[in-house]
Image: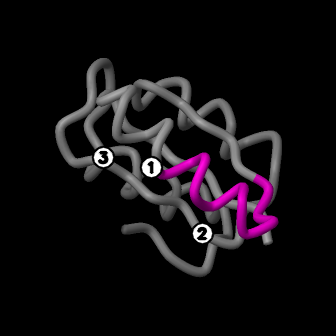
Amino acid sequence: MRILIVDDDEVLAQTLAQSLAAQHYAIDLATDGEAGWDYAQVATYDLIVLDVNLPKLDGIRLCQRLRQKNIANPSCY
């Protein structure tokens, strides 16, 4: 399972990424909405975990953009 974490709280994001990686998930990490957008365009994710308050592009707008461009991911949280 491949997961994208988009969160500007680096300590929280790293802790979550390490915990999930220990469970054998493939993790990509972005620290702002634009970087998250870039990752989502080049890879297919089973799950995208989004923070709402992100720099450059907030989580809600990022999720809306993903849906508008039909970038298919099972969940945006």
Q: What percent of the width, then of the height, locates residue 31? A: 44, 25
Percent coordinates x, y for residue 62 in the rendering: 39, 45
Amino acid beneath label 3: Gly
Q: Amino acid at mark 2?
A: Leu
For badge 1, the amino acid type reads: Arg
Q: Nearer the viewer, residue 61 or 69?
A: 61
Q: Secondary structure at mark 1?
A: helix
**Mark 3 vs mark 2: in front:** 2
Residue 12 is one of the magenta-drawn residues: no
| Mark identifier at residue 47 | 2
Asked whether, in this view, residue 26 is left or right of residue 13, the answer is right
The quarter of the displayed image where residue 28 is located: top right
Check disc 2 and report its element: helix, strand or loop: strand
Q: Say what secondary structure mark 3 lies in.
A: helix
Disc 3 crowd, CA 10 A, few/some/many (<14, 14-19, 20+)? many
The circle on residue 65 is 1
State the residue at coordinates (70%, 72%): 46
Q: Looking at the image, do the residues carrying marks 2 and 1 touch, with CB atoms under 8 Å apart? A: no
Q: Nearer the viewer, mark 2 or mark 1?
A: 2
Point 31% across, 19% down: residue: 56
Question: Which disc, if any, is residue 14?
Answer: none
In which quarter of the view is residue 55 placed?
top left
Query: Magenta residues, as a range?
Result: 16-26
- Which of the numbered marks, if any, corresponds to residue 59? 3
Residue at (53, 60) in percent of width and height: 48
What colouring style does the render use? one colour
